[in-house]
Amino acid sequence: MKNVYLFEEGSKEMKDLLGNKGAQLCEMTKIGVPVPPGFVISTNACKEYFKRGEIWNGLKDEILSALEKLEEKTGKKFGSKENPLLVSVRSGAPVSMPGMMDTILNLGIDDEIVASLAKINERFAYDTYRRFLQMFGSIVMGIDEKKFDEILEKKKAEEGVKRDNELSTEALKEIVEEYRKLYDVPAPQQQLFMAVEAVFKSWNNERAIHYRRLKNLPDDLGTGVVIQAMVFGNLGDDSLTGVAFTRNPANGQKKLFGEFLINAQGEDIVSGKRTPMPIDELKKIYPEIYEELQKVAEKLERHYRDMQDIEFTVEKGKLYILQTRTGKRTGKAAVKIAVDMVKEGIISKEEALLRIDANSLQQLLHKQIKEDKSLKVIAKGLPASPGAAVGKVCFSPKKAAEIGDEEKIILVREETTPDDIHGVVKSQGVLTARGGITSHAAVVSRGLGIPCIVGCSEIKINEKEGFMEIEELTIKEGEEITIDGTTGRVIYGKAELIEAEFTDELKELLNWADEYRKLKVYANADFAKDAEKAVYFGAEGIGLCRTEHMFLGERLPIVRKIFLEKEKRKEALKELLDLQKKDFFDLFKVMNGKPVIIRLLDAPLHEFLPSYDELLEKKIKGEMNEMERRIFEELGELREVNPMLGFRGVRLAILHPEIYRMQTRAIIEAALMVEEKGYKAMPMIEIPIVSDVNELVVIKKEIEDEIRKVFEEKGKKIEYKIGAMFELPRACLTADEIAMHIDFISFGTNDLTQTTFGYSRDDAEKQFLDYYIEHKILPKNPFQSIDEKGVGELIKIAVEKARKVNKNIEIGICGEQAGEANTVKFCYKAGLDSVSCSPYRIVIARVASAQAVLESE
Amino acid sequence: MKNVYLFEEGSKEMKDLLGNKGAQLCEMTKIGVPVPPGFVISTNACKEYFKRGEIWNGLKDEILSALEKLEEKTGKKFGSKENPLLVSVRSGAPVSMPGMMDTILNLGIDDEIVASLAKINERFAYDTYRRFLQMFGSIVMGIDEKKFDEILEKKKAEEGVKRDNELSTEALKEIVEEYRKLYDVPAPQQQLFMAVEAVFKSWNNERAIHYRRLKNLPDDLGTGVVIQAMVFGNLGDDSLTGVAFTRNPANGQKKLFGEFLINAQGEDIVSGKRTPMPIDELKKIYPEIYEELQKVAEKLERHYRDMQDIEFTVEKGKLYILQTRTGKRTGKAAVKIAVDMVKEGIISKEEALLRIDANSLQQLLHKQIKEDKSLKVIAKGLPASPGAAVGKVCFSPKKAAEIGDEEKIILVREETTPDDIHGVVKSQGVLTARGGITSHAAVVSRGLGIPCIVGCSEIKINEKEGFMEIEELTIKEGEEITIDGTTGRVIYGKAELIEAEFTDELKELLNWADEYRKLKVYANADFAKDAEKAVYFGAEGIGLCRTEHMFLGERLPIVRKIFLEKEKRKEALKELLDLQKKDFFDLFKVMNGKPVIIRLLDAPLHEFLPSYDELLEKKIKGEMNEMERRIFEELGELREVNPMLGFRGVRLAILHPEIYRMQTRAIIEAALMVEEKGYKAMPMIEIPIVSDVNELVVIKKEIEDEIRKVFEEKGKKIEYKIGAMFELPRACLTADEIAMHIDFISFGTNDLTQTTFGYSRDDAEKQFLDYYIEHKILPKNPFQSIDEKGVGELIKIAVEKARKVNKNIEIGICGEQAGEANTVKFCYKAGLDSVSCSPYRIVIARVASAQAVLESE
């Protein structure tokens, strides 16, 4: 059995046998990339070692024989004093386990060889020997690394220097002397065998085992061992070392991007001890090396068909590639690189689409904070609406409404209520101390596209005296802060922001996605301006227009009349009718014939009334006026133990059908008006919180009766559809009864997740859900990405039952999860027709739904 | 085609053809019961009539020919002046539609015949004619009935009498004269055909159609027409009319039970115009008639194999049976009659079991109010714990606790909190103004077997001044009221109560049920005294011991220490450990080896703290002390938007495992102690609110670790089981993952119903659920009887998935519904092993589960 492979003998397909690193080096060698020569000891040999418990003679022979070939190629000799070959010995498992196992550099040196090398370059020689002595001593000989560090640190202190490379040659020699007292250096060949054994053993060190547990990797793969001729970037000014991306990882531009250091070793770049030069400088200093590097880069990119992250070294004018791997990149760069590579004929459109992390696309459409070590993060809350914003702290929605047009304001509140919406609208961003990701502030901000952080319990607001405290820090009203709604960070002062950009490459990628995807992509949009944004990002319809937001703000007094002043109810409903008609008219006009799903009022009544606690306080203090007294009494009646499971949606409508009738009339009259003006309208009326077919039947009769009346009054008709929102397990379980009465179903996966898990979203995250995710009790947050096992199972049951009785029923999803890539893919597999998400997430949904098709082929 | 059948020609099997009433009269004739002779026109004839639109000659001929036979049998002649035969013409459809269609009595009379009859008995003749004229006139001739009534009322006013039977013969003659002015009376034969046609038509009158819609009956059955010789109980003192049950419908005693009126017609008994005599009097007055009636009663009972409700008339000393039907009876009578009839060889045990309305059995075990028209019902609330109680109103739990041993107290509260339990325990009953059927007061009362009414919003309590108001009425503390927890009625003053009785017949019936049933019947019992009661009623184990009740009352201060005084937590846990150990010891001792499922703490923390509102009030008023301030702050943190979906059960335990560890230790130590004392113990530890397998795995590890420790410390082991409560849809949907880690599953259908429907039980009933049930949007309250379509579907999914991976897993149900007959039957069909209900409902479960087996055979 062959255990040792020269780089020339392997290829990237042999990963299991040679380990990842070894196979990649073989591959590069095979395609003619200038890799320092070397060979690989196979993973089989590693497994055999664990059986035998020692390096056997056959293996030693193979190693020595490969070593001879290495000597031929380099013209150097391992263990020779005159022209010594030094090698590196590295681990390399079939799956990457970065930093988990051991590496020894500069192997093949000893007292005599170093003396000989010193004749050519004394500093280099002792520096190399010192490095070897420490690595070999700590890893192979098992000497506590601290002992080496102590000697080194002591010497640096004596010389009054901070960095290793500032040490004098004399000092390096003294260090070597000290190190040598710690152990006897074996002969080079002995070093080699001992190092190989150490690498084998490191497969089973604690760190590696723990890592495999964590990543769920098998324990029986074993590691390969890569033995490679050392090349040195620190042999003088004609030597250097560097890293380069084949394209710019920040913006995707096709141009070498990276940095290098003259007369240095790779670790000097990584350690940040010296400031490297940008790669453009290399072009000026060594144009021929730059050109060669560029050619190699192109070759690697074409071969690996992706942008590469390359480590290279130049030893005395000769370029060596030490490593190449797929380069990490920003979302923006990923899009540009993928699209460019299609144009360059390197990859296909399908590959380009599959390569994109769809979830990362949203960030391209929001302002972002320019990351900087000086950012002063003072608190963290729940990221409730993405994007970054800078503004002056303001505690009063009223004031925000007044000055928000002139100044940039961040509205900071304990929590927001419907009363506050006029202030929210005029703010750059919203920060609240309480509330979850479905709290009022969060929902409204997402709807408006304003960055928002909620549940930031570290801030203590003193609105009356106009300041807030975060631990020791006091921030007064008017001081500037920055909030990052994508991560939940609150930053002191004004951070620099990066503007969002809907690039041509992204547009092109999205067009390709549209060629493949089968799911329709709709938007959740409540107002015409959201709808415009949604259409701009490619929405094919409105999948959810939540009408509750249309009942807030300056309309609140009218809404309250309906509940509190029964004698004015009729008049108030008429007033709302006209306002709602305008809302829907604007929406239909923007969508011009595209489907618009309008959910009839879903919220419980008390959401439109002031807070009970506040009124209770007034009552106790005897400060309550007559109107407040009425509201307080009404609230007493309306107060619910579990509002999530309360008196809302269709339940409320069955007992009080007048609001649904008003909304239906507004929808149908608006649709007729829009058509009169030469546009098209496709109204789809959605009934929320259905748990039983009879609820639907009863309320559908009311809706259709109102529609019939409007048609009669206006003498005109229009096409419309009626559907149900499925937010409760029972709707899913009885879909076969419900589906025959409706044209469409939309899964409201926020509420469906709450009821399926029995988690209250307002509370769960802070109480236990974050802990669950951190401790892997749940693999992910089911409110962010769909829970396939539970919620998904209900969706599948519902789709199957519904289609059995109504083949043509349209089925979609409109919960928060619908804009998340895995959820979109699940929806495709589950046989849905559409997904509907917030406008900015449409780009995610378009790409992810194309990926779903491509992945299932 | 034959359209007309003599009573001798039919039988009860011919219901579809002859209608129900006709077929029953045929049947009685066939078995020799003295029925007035007659014949039936078939439903086919009715259908044919609707095709033809008129009575055809062939049918007329058949009717006349049957009429001749009637004349032969009675020796009278239809239309004859000398010896006239009068008949009744009644409708009778294949399904009973009581009162929906028309009936005409005394048909075959006219001016000449009445004059002739008057010679024998003038008063009888004109009274009969007057009745006929009104019925025929209004029903057949279509004259407004008011016109007849006006004439009658006017005459009564003139004579100064209140009742029809007080009118003088002269007055009756004058009424007839007036009536006769309203229309011309057709000849007898013509009367007959017209009446038949009127009955046919009445099949399609509005009332009848509406009734069929309501009862979901088909429209094409048609009605039969029964024509029968009239017999008169009002021909003198040798004539009488009466009703009789073959056994006592109140207590089941085997003895004729009923009443009669001499010289009267049947309607006189029904109308209550004269006070009838008890049937025992008949034995004294006409012993031979009584004897004949008794023989007929026996014959009917044996023939119909059930207790009968008989209408009879004696005409000049001859007994006629007019109608027989299965008699309605109380729950108590039903049990006695069924058991007696088995012993008498009339029915089999299986029939006896199937005949019992299982749900009605519970009432036998609770005190009941003796129904009486004088009961003054002053309010109605939700029936939360069955049974009736009388006592003095008391608004303070503290006072109730003090005086409850000497005086009978009804505790009346806005709502109860854990603080109040010491008062609840000493009360005869509990009445609250707020709360639903799962509120604290309700749950505690059911557990204690104390009658309870909750959510009685009509009462306004002024605790300070010691009175409550119900509309105009003011009731002071100390005044007596009666509450009926079975119906929710609040009654002013002291009503008479009927004591409960666990009769020998019921015990016998339950023993028979045990022979057939396959489901095990467990009890929900939290304390040893409940367990004793449960065993007395036949429980085979404890299916749910809720440990939260063990944390209340005088233990509350200890529990609060755990949450509020972290430094005393350990000590408090130790204190609770000892108390819990005692709880479990007592329970195991009573159950002596029968399984005892103990649910670990399920309630959210804030349930153990005082109300937030109360503290808020104190805070605003500045009346808060230091301890209250701490509680208030803690409550602020713990307050939940949706406590039902909150931080409780296994969720809380994962973050704070010490309570579950303490409870586990208490269970296992108690079990070991019980065995030491020579009893047996079978502890089953139940984990609540599981939504994901990992929650279970994590907490099971803690529990088993604690058990291991106890075993080690004590040097002894004991068998135990660990299971999960399935109260969330996701547990059901992922049962295949969860089931492999546990020994048993118990469906908590209260919470499962809440999450499946998205209904908050605390709020739903008052807000919309009552409306839904009243308006048939839902067929029944899913919190009382299982919702098979939704919740049941989840249970079926869970059972199937669980058994697939764990064949021997024990599966039960322990929600409120488990003590309801339909739910029990569903559970049997769904393949469950056991049902667990409150002690008093065990009798229901035992019988219903036997019925389930018998019905499925």
Image (cartoon, coloured by chain):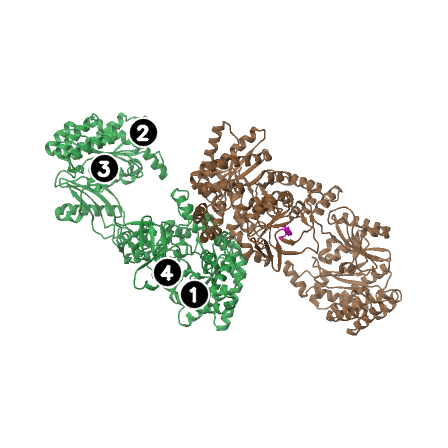
Chain colours: A brown, B green
Q: Amino acid at mark 2?
A: Glu
Same chain for marks 2 and 3? Answer: yes
Helix, strand or loop at mark 3: helix
User: Circle 1 is placed at which residue position?
Assistant: B555
Q: Is residue A191 above or below residue B177?
A: below
3 and 1 marks on the same chain: yes
Kindly identify the amino acid type of the residue bearing the numbered disc 3: Glu
Residue at the image point whose x is 15% and y is 45% from the top: B289
Q: Position of residue B394 (x, y in %)?
A: 33, 58
How far apart are labels 3 and 1 at the CA level?
77 Å
Q: Nearer the viewer, mark 2 or mark 4?
A: 4
Residue A450 position in % (x across, y down) = 61, 46
**In the rendered structure, does residue B376 fall within the stretch colored magenta?**
no
Which residue is at the far bottom? A181
User: Pointer 2 indicates a residue of which chain?
Assistant: B
Dot 1: element? helix
Q: Earlier in the sequence, mark 4 or mark 1?
A: 4
Q: Is residue B823 above or below residue A82?
A: above
Residue A303 location (% of width, % of height): 76, 48
Instruction: Report how far apart the C-alphas of labels 2 and 1 lie in the structure.
Output: 78 Å
Of the two numbered discs 2 and 3 in the rendering, the one whose residue sits closer to the viewer:
2
Position of the N terminus of chain B by quadrant = top left
Q: Amino acid at mark 4?
A: Pro
Q: Which residues are magenta?
A: A478-488
Instruction: Determine which quarter of the picture holds residue B14.
Output: top left
Estimate the spatial distance between the alpha carbons at disc 2 and disc 4, rounded to whole Å.
72 Å
**Pointer 3 residue:** B8
